[in-house]
Image (cartoon, rainbow, N blue to C red):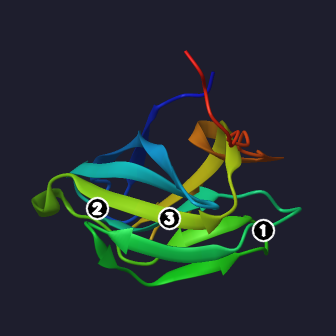
Amino acid sequence: MCPETVQIEITHPVTGSTSIVTITFIGVSITNNTSTWCYNVEVEGEPALSHWNLGLCPDPFPSIIAATRNGQPVIYEPLSDGFTGIKFEEGVDQGDGIVEYCVTLEGIWAKEAVDIAVKGGPGDEIIRRNAICGPGCNHVTPPRMRRGYQFA
């Protein structure tokens, strides 16, 4: 089993103020040969979350079809230098409440514990290894449906 929720404390390096970022795995939906992975992100306190990264398999790196924030397309960046995954460029502050982020990948991937990284204010990025459920490195083949008739 992989963790479904992770909390990370961010401290502003100048003011010393802290915030708690909570990321919760909502689930994964499969459509045709794609998988959509969704997460709720919430920030309590300051600094705000400037961006966050979801770890993806380095080999083979999955094709990213789309990313959304509260159902709207969002700017994202595939990462492969230092942290392998997807970077959600648009952050969250306390006034946003709970924000839903989703990423749609080509293929169906096994649910495994993956890394995340968060950054708030001018501080350094904080990485947590195997922190939350996400798309692992094992590609899953969906079962084939049989054709034919069933006689009673």
The answer to whether residue 111 is above or below residue 37 is above
Is residue 101 in sight in this rendering? Answer: yes
CA–CA distance in space, label 3 to label 1: 20 Å
Q: Earlier along the polypeptide chain: callout 3 or callout 1?
A: 1
Residue 50 rendering spot, x and y as whole percentages: 38, 71
**What amino acid is labelled 1 in the image?**
Gly
Give residue 82's mark: 1
Image point (61%, 65%), residue name: 105
Q: State which quarter of the image contains the N terminus.
A: top right
Q: Residue furthest right?
A: 59
**What amino acid is labelled 2 in the image?**
Pro
Image point (59%, 38%), residue name: 131
Q: On the image, numbered disc 3 is attached to which residue? A: 103
Q: Earlier along the polypeptide chain: callout 3 or callout 2?
A: 2
**What amino acid is labelled 3 in the image?**
Val
Between 77 and 119, the one lying in front of the other is: 77
Between 47 and 69, the one lying in front of the other is: 69
Q: Residue furthest front?
A: 151
Residue 53 rendering spot, x and y as whole percentages: 55, 63
Label 2: state its secondary structure.
loop
Q: On the image, numbered disc 2 is attached to which residue? A: 47
Q: Residues within 10 Å of mark 1 (few under 14, many from 20)?
A: few
